[in-house]
Structures are given as C-alpha cells and as structure tokens.
Amino acid sequence: MMDNCSLIELHVDSVMSTVEISNCQRVKLIIKPGASVLSVAIDKTDGCHITLSEETQANADFQVIAAKSSEMNLIFTENDEKVEKPIPEQFVFKVDRSGGAPKITSAVSDLYSS
C-alpha cells in the first residue's frame, strides 16, 4: 500500500491480491516483467501511471478500481509498441425505468471514445 506519497515510482513483483494507492500525487506503479498483479485500487490520488507486465495484461481478471482520483493512465504493450490509455474519470448516469424497479445505469463519457 502506498499512502500519502508524492513523486514515487514503485516497482513490484507478483502480488497475491491488490496494490493499493491512496492519497498520493504523481506516482508510478510499474509491474515488473514476469510479475502478475490481480488488481490495483486507487483512491483520492492525482496522477497515477500504471505500467502493466505482459503477464498482468494477459490476465482477463485484472482490474483497476478507482474512486475520487484523476490523471490515471494504463501503459501496456500492443504489437510490440507501448500504448498509454487514460482511465476514464467522467461517466454518464441515467435512470433506467424499463422493466421492474428503476435502476441507475452508467457508461463512460464520449470524451474517452477513440
């Protein structure tokens, strides 16, 4: 767990559960080649860049859980090139009244479509 850190670059080997990043500014999480991480939880953090290992990006169960955070990016390899994609910060919420009881649905804002 990284808590209340600034300008930190953390390199990790395999982690059994979750890497937690909380109350941080401008941090980098680098999952070392050959290492695997199941999830990353980001809370109240501004500026978080996560570089995925090949093993982590091949895991279909890998997830990022984020709350109250901004400037988050995932960096991974595609066709032998590094690709950096933003983790969405803006969502659209609607009340779905079709069917039984009303439900709240959410979707990523069109700002992130590309």
Image: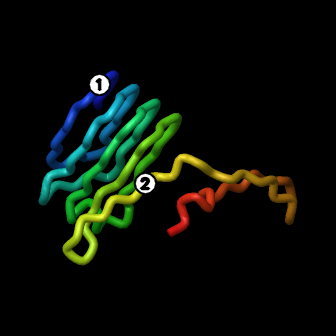
- At 53% across and 47% down in the image, what residue appears? 89
Task: Give the percent coordinates (x, y) of residue 79.
Answer: 24, 77
Residue 42 lies in what quarter of the image?
top left
- At 37% across and 66% down in the image, what residue appears? 60
Task: Give the percent coordinates (x, y) of residue 103.
Answer: 78, 53
The label nearer to you, 1 versus 2, is: 2
Q: Secondary structure at mark 1?
A: loop
Crowd tier of the residue under label 1, counting other residues whose Cα lies within 10 Å: few below 14, some 14–19, many 20 or above: some
What amino acid is found at the position of numbered circle 1 in the picture? Cys
Residue 41 lies left or right of residue 58; in this view the side is: right
Rendering colour mode: rainbow
Residue 96 lies in what quarter of the image?
bottom right
What amino acid is found at the position of numbered circle 2 in the picture? Pro
Task: Give the percent coordinates (x, y) of residue 6.
Answer: 28, 26
Residue 7 vertical placement versus 72 (above, below):
above
| Residue at the extreme bottom of the image, as rendered | 79
Residue 60 vertical placement versus 42 (above, below):
below
Task: Give the percent coordinates (x, y) of residue 87.
Answer: 45, 52
Which label sits on residue 86? 2
- At 29% across and 31% down in the image, what residue appears? 1
Question: If you read the primary sequence from the N terminus, does the residue marked by circle 1 or circle 2 appear first?
Answer: 1
Which label sits on residue 5? 1
Q: Secondary structure at mark 2?
A: strand
